[in-house]
Image: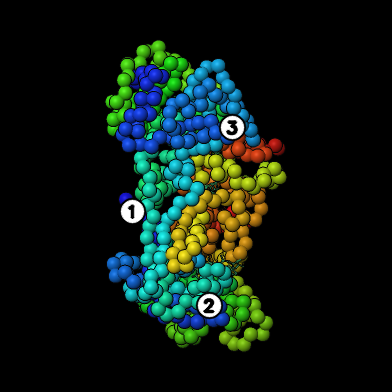
Amino acid sequence: MGNGDDPQFLPLTQLERLLRSLRDAGYDCIGPQLKDGAILYQSLESIHDLPHGLSDLQSPGSYRLTENQGGRLFDWANGPSSLKPLIFPPHENLWRANKGSDGGIEFSSYTPDIAPLAVLGVRACDLAAMERMDHHFLRPEKQDPWYRKRRESLLLIVVNCSHPSDNCFCTSTGTGPESRSGYDLRLHELDDGFLIDAATDRGEEILQKLELSPAAQQMVEEAKEELERAATVQGQAVAVDDFRPIFSGREDDPIWERIAERCLGCGNCTAVCPTCFCHREEKIPTLSLDSSTHQRVWDSCFTAEHSMLHGQPVRREIRERYRQWLTHKLAGWHDQFGESGCVGCGRCITWCPVGINLVAESAAFAVPEEGVE
Amino acid sequence: MVSRSGVPMEAEIVERLQESESVFTLRLRLLDEQQRHNYRFEPGQFNMVYLHGVGEVAISIVSDESNRHLLNHTIRAVGRVTRGLEQMQKGDVIGLRGPFGRGWPMEQARGRDIVIITGGVGCAPVVSALAHINRRRKHFGRVAIVEGVRHRRDLIYPDRFARWQRMDDTQILLCTSEPSAPWPWHTDRVTEHLGKMDIDPSGALVLLCGPEGMMISAARVLQELGIDESSIWLSMERNMQCGEGFCGHCQIGSYFVCRDGPVFNWTEIRELLAVKGI
Ligand SMILES: Cc1cc2nc3c(=O)[nH]c(=O)nc-3n(C[C@H](O)[C@H](O)[C@H](O)COP(=O)(O)OP(=O)(O)OC[C@H]3O[C@@H](n4cnc5c(N)ncnc54)[C@H](O)[C@@H]3O)c2cc1C
Ligand code: SF4
Ligand code: SF4
Ligand code: FES
């Protein structure tokens, strides 16, 4: 495992106690569970609800669960749900306007009404994605209070990833499979328990309530080997981390047209992507004319409305919208935030109805054009 | 840590002026004294203007920044929010969030000849720069204003133009595509008339706003006239939802127009402007 203190061992039988300790400390808990044929984060009542003995098979445009013989709880790669809806929900009430009898308007901010929330089973890529979201919503010169409130309510319990899917490429983006920072508690699943360590005081407080034993050297070795395996089995890798030099001057490359011929412009990729932050602001209808609520709602650069200007979309064609998505993720993000907008989670590949693969599409730009020295 | 402004401020309409058939100016006063006191803006910045129960739109501030009591918005009624705002009367209250964005480089402009070129219907972004210059006229060199409109009736502030035209060292070229328009109008596009400007190209600073096609051709002609490309500034428009760098709608290339703009230097944005649908 990574840096920090020496890990300790949490026997499997103590996992329920971890959950109880979290509740006793005032946290609502959510964790991965089988729902509608996928592993999703849901309110977690008992560790018996965790996806016992399940693994996933993912490929471009496809997600399937299979039973495995091992009986572990975290033997799967990420499903469609990331941390994004917890910090940046699909709908967020921002403010309310009430018209007074004197003709004035009283504006008041909504504050998200949320209890401290512990998330069990976070993956390294999603932790990295959340840090990227922080860089957007919590800029040093301007912070988004709604995001901040939700973000600060989270206690993050990561589980190192030992089962990347065929669509994962976090090794190449440097964001996984091991979580190295940004978590409160970190687990590494072994057959009969977990290695556990804390990185924050809040995590340490929970750790103190558990009955732990020092981890045996052989457990630490085993974890290390599993992580190495998880890092090397990944079937694909982004060509480079920073695509700015590669995309530069290629705005009208025929490759965009070839992708656009397949792309449906549905926006599934932006919805599942843990770093896509675009949203529109809307007033939501209320029965009273005197009161109006202003809300932000997830949006996608694949819609015509996203770039609507003077009654016409700036990006009229799917070619231009796909170009926006890919160049923003892999190139523009570097200018904006000094890092890539892609953490290698593979979700946009799995949940694309026609199986467009960001890794393959971007690689096409990276190979030298034929006939060019 | 600074929180985003997030929630609008109440602003009362102190005066409403009809500028042309579909253009009107609202003179606004923030109702809260503290907010009024804290509110400072630069020419070229904008507010998100909220009409109760309808929505918010980005609108440039057109008044001079030294007027700490009133701020003006000149608005063209084109759609849901702006048509609703058109119905507002003196005494009505609307909401404002702002000011947002990077304005014109007024410090850099000091002492130099100034060229202001507008086209189409949207000259609002340069108006507060003009107000700024006219209030401090001796700090600037010669001023050439080239304004293009489709029809003569689209010209807003005709009285002000008439007044400016009489000022020393100020040249105004009004252009319309309407055939056989009477004097003082020039027919044709603004770009056809830039050669008539009585300014020193080597030291001039240019403020451009209008349709992107017009700005691109104007920038080309200006460079042919000997104006350095880094002396050309322009105000951009994009879809804006939040106005303060969060919603992602205003992106052009790596820029957030609401935050990195709306005013850009030509050298920052020329490559992007050359790409269709970016
Ligand atoms: C930074 C910035 C500054 C701006 N400053 C100003 C300003 O000072 N004054 C001002 O009037 N506007 C300004 N605008 C433009 C203004 O924000 C839009 O006109 C406004 O958002 C339209 O909203 P709406 O709800 O009224 O129209 P919507 O209901 O959104 O409808 C738009 C509809 O109106 C038509 N339409 C919209 N805009 C135009 C147009 N420009 N020309 C022709 N038809 C159009 C289209 O047919 C379209 O279907 C600015 C925009 C930006 C980004
Ligand atoms: S672009 Fe795709 S692989 Fe990268 S973070 Fe977003 S969803 Fe994951
Ligand atoms: S512009 Fe597109 S790719 Fe970028 S954050 Fe918004 S939705 Fe995601
Ligand atoms: S208008 Fe929302 S990011 Fe610029």
Q: Position of residue A345 (x, y in %)?
A: 53, 34
**The residue at label 2 has a CB less than 8 Å from ligand 1:** yes
Image location (x, y in percent) of residue A17: 36, 25
Depth check: give the residue in front, B37 or A47.
Answer: A47
Q: Name the chain under label 3.
A: A
**Is residue A259 shown left or right of residue A119?**
right
Could one spot residue A327 in this view of the protein?
Answer: no
User: Residue A249: horizontal and vertical position, in percent?
Assistant: 60, 47
Q: Give the residue displayed 40% in from the left and 16% down from the top.
A: A220
* Disc 2: CA contacts within 10 A as few (<14), some (14-19) or many (>=20): many
Q: Chain of mark 1?
A: B
Instruction: Tell whether B275 sits left or right of A49.
Output: right
User: Of helix, strand and loop, which one carries label 3?
Assistant: loop
Quarter of the picture holding the N terminus of chain A = top left
Residue type at mark 3?
Answer: Gly
Q: Is A352 rendered above or below residue B118?
A: above
